[in-house]
Amino acid sequence: MLTAKDIMTTDVVTVNLETPISEVASIFHDNSIGGAPVVDVNGCLEGIITESDLIDQTKKMHIPTVVAIFDAVVYLDSMRNFEKELKKMTGSKVSDVYTKDVTSINIDTPLNEIASIMSDKRYHTIPVLDGDKLAGIVGKDDIVKTMAAK
């Protein structure tokens, strides 16, 4: 059975936590990609940044609804969510907008499991790890290419 190491792309475009958002947009455009793993100086996976993270910077801001009761102000929405959204919208580097909790697979993950993860979670790409180091990335196009080669 095929595994991640058999179908993954090993020439992965990556960014780091200090990469400016404007540079990330150029990287995505120049390489025709929709996301990139975020790695540290040792090549260990820190998270992922996607086009959606960049698009979030240009959306309308939702101001939390408040109700004044007597001398108190009650927020009907979570202030924590508002602060997180505000940080993401005003971020200038990867560390401000990337997703930290990333689903990853290892090099020995079977193809059918990769396909299930992508389908169930609606992921387009999944980072592949060899130990704690980024070894590659599997995208939906890698799976389709493998199916076409059969």
Image (cartoon, rainbow, N blue to C red):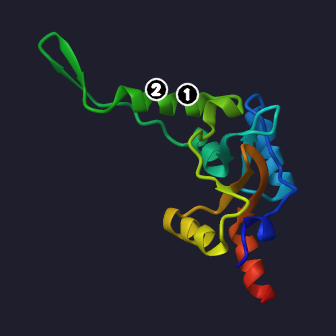
Count of residue discs? 2
Left or right of 12 in this view: 110: left
| CB within 8 Å, label 1 to label 2 | yes
Which image quarter is the C terminus in? bottom right
Amino acid type, label 2: Glu
Residue at the disc numbered 2? 83
Q: Quadrant of residue 98?
A: top right
The location of residue 16, given as percent across then percent down, is 77, 35
Amino acid type, label 1: Lys
SS class of the residue under badge 2? helix
In the image as oriented, which residue stretches furthest toward the top? Answer: 71
Residue at the disc numbered 1? 87
The circle drawn on residue 72 is: none
Q: Residue at x 66, y 58 (%)?
A: 126
In the image as oriented, which residue stretches furthest toward the left? Answer: 70
Which image quarter is the N terminus in? bottom right
Left or right of 111 in this view: 43: right
Q: Nearer the viewer, residue 79 or 98?
A: 98
SS class of the residue under badge 1? helix
The location of residue 102, given as percent across then percent down, is 59, 47
Q: Residue at x 65, y 41 (%)?
A: 47
The location of residue 59, given as percent across then percent down, is 54, 43
The location of residue 81, given as percent across then percent down, is 41, 33
Q: Quadrant of residue 114?
A: bottom right
Relative to 32, residue 81 above or below: above
Q: Nearer the viewer, residue 40 or 109?
A: 109
Inter-mark Cα distance, 1 to 2:
6 Å
Q: Nearer the viewer, residue 43 or 34?
A: 43
